[in-house]
Image (tube, rainbow, N blue to C red):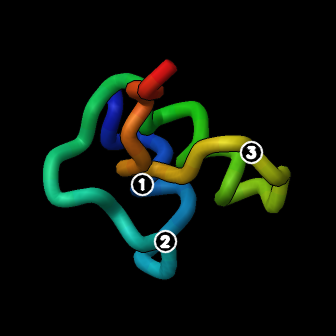
Amino acid sequence: DSLSPVIVAGGGIRLPREMRSVDIGPLCMEALGVPMRYRPGDPRLTNS
């Protein structure tokens, strides 16, 4: 369930308006204090 990390992490984490499956990993890592390249809600498209 994609809501589980939110419940475990508590209310201190800033959540994107619309949660996507690609936001779950960064959300969990942020709750654990592990740095990630992307934050929840960051775009994943590159202009290359």
Quadrant location of the N terminus in the rendered image: top left
Left or right of 37 in this view: 35: right
Q: Residue furthest top?
A: 48
Give the residue at x 55% y 61%.
9
Asked whether disc 3 touches disc 1, contact meaning CB atoms under 8 Å apart, the reply is: no
- Residue type at tag 2: Ile
- Dot 2 or dot 3: first in sequence order is 2
When the figure is inspected, residue 29 is found, relative to residue 15, above or below; the finding is: above
Report which residue position mark 2 lands on.
Answer: 13
Give the residue at x 39% y 26%.
45
3D distance between C-alphas at marks 3 and 1:
17 Å
When the figure is inspected, residue 10 is found, relative to residue 29, above or below; the finding is: below
At numbered mark 3, what does the secondary structure look like: helix, strand or loop? loop
Left or right of 46 in this view: 38: right
In the rendering, which numbered label is found on residue 6?
Answer: 1
- Dot 3 or dot 1: first in sequence order is 1
Give the residue at x 43% y 26%.
47
